[in-house]
Amino acid sequence: MNTYGKIFRITTYGESHGKALGVVIDGCPAGLEIDEEFINEELRRRRPGQSKITTQRKEADEIQILAGVFEGKSTGMPISLVVFNEDQRSKDYSHISDKFRPSHADYTFTAKYGVRDYRGGGRSSARETLARVAAGAVAKQFLATKNISVNAYVSQAGNISLDIPYQDLDLSNTENNIVRCPDDNTAERMIELIDQTRKNRDTIGGVVSCVIQGVPAGLGEPVFDKLHAELGKAMLSINAVKGFEIGSGFKGVELNGSDHNDIFYTDEDGNVKTKTNNSGGVQGGISNGEDIYFRTAFKPVATIMKDQDSVNEAGEKVTVTGKGRHDPCVVPRAVPIVEAMAAIVIADFYLRNVTSKL
């Protein structure tokens, strides 16, 4: 349950209020230049306390490389990365030590394990994703050597949507504002909505869109390990994710097959291309060389600063009072998480493909 991947394989460990969180990466090819500062830059994009619309927990989230890298390059051995927690306030959670918070994993963890770490949700906390982002930064560095890029951005916050196709956006503008939406006008409206929601002591959800470019045709498997199925699994493994769609997604059901089909042609260089990309870059579970694009939906953050009815471990009716430091909307900090998981999936399939044919 803590490991993902078959060749480029990651295992994450640690809890929200434990001593540290980290990841072990196995299967990374030897000789890859590992840019430690790039890993830290990716972690800074995810870390708490970034702005007025994120949780105010203060963590430096500086990576330490414990193994698998020598003189700046991967050795082919397992790479161990760790971040030590600094700003835990476990007392913020003592009031819910025996209570089940609505829409959290408190009850389900208790039902499965008979014990739970109530300090910030323990292993079920979104803080676990920093380990994924660290691993994803390594995957991104591997993919960069293959001219493959992964870019995500916020395309919806609450009821405010960015309806401009990604092809018409300058994705280099994504980091220009605190909500990580590449369209400034839409970003301003999103920020205002999130901040007002925070002031109302409530939360909202949103959508992160992702574009993967430069993926060659032929990555993926035709049956159970379809490329889009693994991308969906990776995204749905992220905290608070409730929906995934690739290409035309649910809107595609409104089209006739004659409109939805992606027509093939050969470009001037002799490459097989498609005139449209309703498939989202994947056909038959295998990449077709076009851009891979998908959308991931995040629910409203479960912890709200309002009293809610619930029950405790004895089944007695109780009131749960929201305390601590929490995001009013997760999507600004989820952008690097989505990118990381996408990069890990593509890196794994790229390395799998090396041995798929003679």
Image: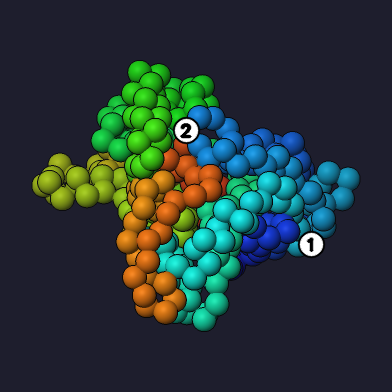
The correct choice, above or below, for 353 with respect to 315 in the image is above
* Disc 1 secondary structure class: loop
Would you identify the image quadrant in which residue 255 lies?
A: top left
Residue that carries the numbered disc 1 in the rendered image? 77
Question: In the depicted view, which residue is nearer to us: 266 or 315?
Answer: 315
Residue 178: give x, y in percent of width and height.
49, 27
188 or 256, which lies in front? 188
Residue 326: x %, y % from top left: 50, 45
Task: Judge whether residue 171 can be spotted in this image.
Answer: no
Which quarter of the rendering shows the N terminus? bottom right
Residue 186 percent coordinates (x, y)? 34, 23
Please report the residue visible at 47 percent of the width from the left and 79 percent of the height from the top.
Answer: 112
Amino acid type assigned to the residue bearing label 2 in the image: Ile
Residue extending furthest toward the right: 71
The residue drawn where x is 36% and y is 53% is 307
Alpha-carbon distance for marks 2 and 1? 40 Å
Apparent side of residue 167 relative to residue 248 in the rendered image (left or right): right
Q: Which residue is mark 2?
A: 53
Earlier sequence position, callout 2 versus callout 1 = 2
Name the amino acid, label 1.
Answer: Met
